[in-house]
Image (tube, helix red, strand yellow):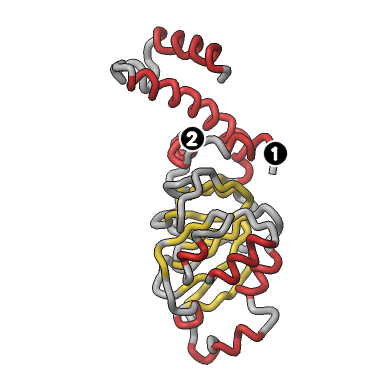
Amino acid sequence: MNPKTREKLLQVSVATLATALFKRSLRNQTIQDVRPVKPKGQNMVGPAFTLRYMPAREDRNQLVEFRNPEHPQRKAIETCPVGHIMVIDSRKDPRAASAGDILVTRLMVRGGGGIVTDGGFRDAMRIGELDMPSYHNRPASPTNLTLHEAIDINVPIGCGDAPVFPGDIIVGDDDSVIVVPAHLADEVADEAFEMTAYEDFVVEQVQAGESIIGLYPATKDESMNKFTAWRKENGR
């Protein structure tokens, strides 16, 4: 992805991106019911690499399946490109794990930029300690084979009700995760970066006792004039 776009997306919130996408009539880009396994205090940013699960059928999902070197779950971990975010469609079902700490550690060592599932992770407490952002619904101890079959890699998926296409830009903060369509990433990053500067200015003004009327949103020339002076003073 564009390095300048990535740098801007590292500095904006998912909430701000949601507003920028809403302006473009995109209402369902936030991945619902996922949260950081452990907050990292910095954004996760990267292109999507997807893994899709379907309901498990018992005769196809025994432990012996993990001996298959072409098993889609294992293969996805071993082929996810450096810097990409693995996004897993686990059918919004956290009763069985999408992956565990060994696989997520392998993804991290290979240079993965992060991992997101609308299901759960087993060994979540260990995953939370890894130096890679990870997001899930909640911890889940049973193996995915009990309920889910990994069936396809790097195809369009739904994750937490959000549509995710391979190469879309995934941004996660300490609140949640959002999907930015790849063709909009540059312009959305530019707008969100500008919005963030104004929001930071607004926070300072509100903390100093200013009313939000005319300030947020900016409907008074006085507010914009003060913002212009604030930007110059703060190098923003």
Which sits in the foreground, 123 or 198? 123
Residues under labels 1 and 2: Cα distance?
20 Å
Residue 165 shows in this picture: no
Asked if residue 219 is positioned above or below residue 53 in the image, the reply reads: above
Residue 195 shows in this picture: yes
Asked if residue 98 is positioned above or below residue 192 in the image, the reply reads: below
Which quadrant holds residue 211? top left
Q: From the viewer's perspective, tell me whether residue 99 is left or right of residue 221.
A: right
Please state which amino acid type lies under the numbered disc 1. Answer: Pro
Q: Which residue is mark 1?
A: 3
How dense is the environment of label 1, judged by Cα within 10 Å: few (below 14), some, or many (20 and up)? few
How dense is the environment of label 2, judged by Cα within 10 Å: few (below 14), some, or many (20 and up)? many
Question: Whole-percent x and y of residue 22?
Answer: 45, 38
Question: Whole-percent x and y of residue 69?
Answer: 70, 80
Please state which amino acid type lies under the numbered disc 2. Answer: Ala
Residue at image position (44%, 59%) is 160
Q: From the viewer's perspective, tell me whether residue 94 is left or right of residue 3.
A: left
Of mark 1 and mark 2, the one earlier in the sequence is 1
Question: Whole-percent x and y of residue 8?
Answer: 60, 34
Quadrant (top left, top right, bottom left, bottom right) of the C terminus: top right
Question: Whole-percent x and y of residue 92?
Answer: 42, 65
Q: Which residue is mark 2?
A: 20
Asked if residue 6 is positioned above or below residue 219 in the image, the reply reads: below
Which quadrant holds residue 77? bottom right
Q: Which mark is residue 213?
A: none
